[in-house]
Amino acid sequence: MVVPLSSPRVTDITQRAQNILQHLIGFPTISADSNLAMISWMAEHMERQGARVFLDHDDTGSKANLFATLGPDARGGILLSGHTDVVPVADQDWATDPFVLHEGDGRLYGRGTCDMKGFIAATLAIAETVDSDKLTRPLHFAFTYDEETGCLGAQSLVGVMRDLGLVPDITIIGEPTEMRVIEGHKGCCEYTAHFTGLEGHGSAPDLGVNAAEYAVRYVTRLMELREDLIARAPADSKFEPPWTTINVGRISGGVAHNVIAGKAEVEWEMRPVQNSDADFVKSSMARYCADTLLPAMQAVSPDASITLTTVGEIAGLEPMAVNAARELVAELTGANGADLVAFGTEAGLFQALGSHVVVCGPGSIQQAHKPDEYLEIDQLDACMSMLSRLVRYIS
């Protein structure tokens, strides 16, 4: 049984959001597990408000995105979006049960309170206040799966939205920004390059294909591209550093000092400031492998190979000179500008769809993923104020 939380300092609508958040925290939607119970609960909630709802399931059928709309059946509109999955609590020392919401000292404790079920609860609460017949534009809601493991759910949902012609004019991603308006963040693309050569005795290196040596040549080319990326930095880039970065995180291969390495791996990442940089790096490395490394390897062993595994690709949110979402949310919150953040979100996927996008939500990213994660009640109240103004804006 859910016991209503109480706080004399907050408005009734914020109190309602707290009560909804208590339900949401009770769903242990760790990325490795199903989110269907939470999705079903939210779908029923939105349907009771008169929303048009559809679900987008993953291939296993154990996870789903939820998309809901209040208001007119028209193009454009405003989208409020958040992810349903949370990071694990294993091996973390929590003072309370992470999947039971606890209130204390003006804070709401529980896994996902700030990242980012607090924002989702706020959107579900505001939906209860909406008179759909009075909305002048559609108000959409998107709740996704597997953001924490590569934005997999949002990638699927955006594809469905594109096919259906659902392109919101404005998208607000409610990641924890302390209600600051965020107009940009770098992307994060992670890869593992696998090299298969031909083992042999170290005394006759010309008779084998040393996978470790080709891995080193691969890394050397990455480092050359890193210098090229500095020159490609946009003149007005606000990021720090202002260019796309490449980092080699791990190199492994071989079995002994006197054996030609038959296997090797390179784990690397890049953080693009613009999507064109990611395309530049990937195409450059693909050509280098196809035109230089592989011919040399296969001249000795036709079975030699290089394969690239994509661990995850999170599109960046590129700051835009014209951004209707930035202007609207700044007006709703009273912000005097917009900032950038270091962490990644699903925002770039919706930007690529053609929507104007900002990130703005309650809570601090400094509390995310940690034991005793919490959301300040004042932050939730500020979010409810923003959403209330948004509803008035389109009513």
Image: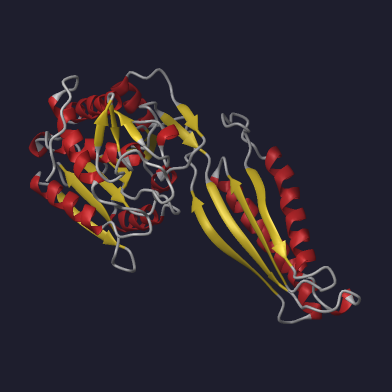
Where residue 369 appears, x then y in whole percent?
42, 42
- Looking at the image, which residue sits at the far bottom? 302
- Looking at the image, which residue sits at the far right? 203
Question: Residue at position x 20%, y 27% from top?
Answer: 393
- Relative depth, front residue between 112 and 126: 112
Q: State whether residue 274 appears in this view.
A: yes
227 w.r.t. 44: above or below:
above
The mark tally for this picture is 0
Where residue 277 appears, x then y in whole percent?
60, 47
Residue 263 figure quarter: bottom right
Question: Residue at position x 15%, y 33% from top?
Answer: 16
Q: State whether residue 126 appears in this view.
A: no
Q: Is residue 131 left or right of residue 60?
A: left
Question: Residue at position x 59%, y 53% from top?
Answer: 279
Q: Is residue 168 left or right of residue 280?
A: left
- Relative depth, front residue between 181 and 113: 113
Q: Is residue 332 left or right of residue 248?
A: left
Where residue 316 appears, x then y in whole percent?
49, 43
Where residue 286 appears, x then y in whole percent?
66, 62
256 w.r.t. 150: above or below:
below
The quarter of the rendered structure image containing the C terminus is top left
Residue 169 figure quarter: top left
